[in-house]
Image (cartoon, rainbow, N blue to C red):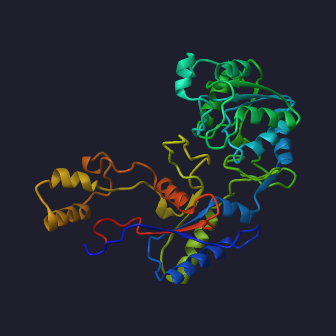
Amino acid sequence: MNRTIGTVSRGVRAPIIREGDDLAAIVTQSVLDAAREGGYELRDRDIVAMTEAIVARAQGNYATVDDIAADVRAKLGGGTVGVLFPILSRNRFAVCLKGIAKGCGKVVLVLSYPSDEVGNHLISLDDLDAKGVNPYTDVLTLERYRALFGYEKHPFTGVDYVEYYENLIRESGAEVEILFANDPRAVLPYTKDVLTCDIHSRARSKRLLKAAGAERVLGLDDILTAPVNGSGCNESYGLLGSNKATEEKVKLFPRNPKALVEKIQSRFLEETGKHVEVMVYGDGAFKDPVGKIWELADPVVSPAYTAGLEGTPNELKLKYLADNDFADLSGADLRDAISGAIRKKDGDLKGQMASEGTTPRRLTDLIGSLCDLTSGSGDKGTPIVHIQGYFDNYTTE
């Protein structure tokens, strides 16, 4: 083993992307320019990834509050609508909520507690215990919630999201009633028309609601699945994965980006002769142990990727080999023994003890999380990430 550098993840700066830009050309040229500036070359099985945001921006995939309102009104009737389990986010949900409320006469807002789906806490588990509240069974009215817990503000944003959402709904022209519950069926005594806004549990929420007698049941993935008055849309995810663009407009998740990643892969092959894997990524999938926020507010980490990124890692655990199979070896003998084991490993290590402790997640989720952490979400200006050595192992020279 002479090589000492393993996986390298580089954020690549790019121009500010506007609607109509040739993103395939921009991504390819940006990576080639970065390699030239950095004095390195592309290699086979490098990974080039781009944020979903620049894909949607290039597509011009936007919708306004009025577009959302029109679709909600058409699909749910414009009367009293239950709005279930939204995440607590000014960026991710507030503009959507304005549009939803504008399309309803009354909103029965049901907030999950003690936290939303991605870990933004309204109250702590300790407070629930102290007050004798069971979040699995107890349904709280707003009055009861205030009496028990008062006015809690988010520790990072300083926002009381209950008050914020309540005011936002009223300002959008709808009446509002607020409940706190974790069973979606808690809304049914108030209305049979429901828009469930959870992300990863939405299929279960819809199933429970329909089985319990709800009449019209939709999710965020059912709103703006087709253009409304010339708006953008997303056939697969609707409003899921959307972000605030302005106070009156959201940027939607990119539409059908599979063709784009394959086009970029072909461009790199033409320009360099190297087979590069390409993906689009959004939120990573990881949890903040302090803020307790689970990052993944997008419906998937990667909405599109080339074929070589399919699957899960197939790796041996070096610590296991060193402590068990080769515990009596050290130095060059240990290195050679581990290298030999890696070269002889099976194509599928699932269930073998020597792979125990390796990360059992999809490649696109792992790589997307690495990309999200590399590019950040602020002003780094690196919406493209170039990863080298991800598929290498201890034996790779």
Image quadrant holding the N terminus, namely bottom left
**Residue 73, percent across and down?**
85, 37
Please give the name of the residue rendered at 61% of the width and 26% of the height, measured from the top-left corner. 182
Q: Is residue 316 above or below residue 74?
A: below
- In the rendered image, the residue lying farthest to the left is 328
Please give the name of the residue rendered at 33% of the width and 54% of the height, measured from the top-left corner. 348
Q: Could you say which is closer to the camera, residue 118 or residue 209? A: 118
- 266 with respect to 173 (left or right): left
**Residue 173, percent across and down?**
89, 35
- 182 with respect to 42 (left or right): right
Q: Is residue 213 visible?
A: no
- 362 with respect to 17 (left or right): left
Image quadrant holding the C terminus, namely bottom left
**Residue 254, percent across and down?**
68, 57
Which of the 4 quarters of the picture holds residue 86?
top right
Q: Could you say which is closer to the camera, residue 10 or residue 341? A: 10
Which of the 4 quarters of the picture holds residue 113?
top right
**Residue 124, percent across and down?**
56, 29
Please give the name of the residue rendered at 77% of the width and 67% of the height, measured from the top-left corner. 19
Q: Is residue 163 visible?
A: yes
Q: How many badges with numbers are in the image?
A: 0
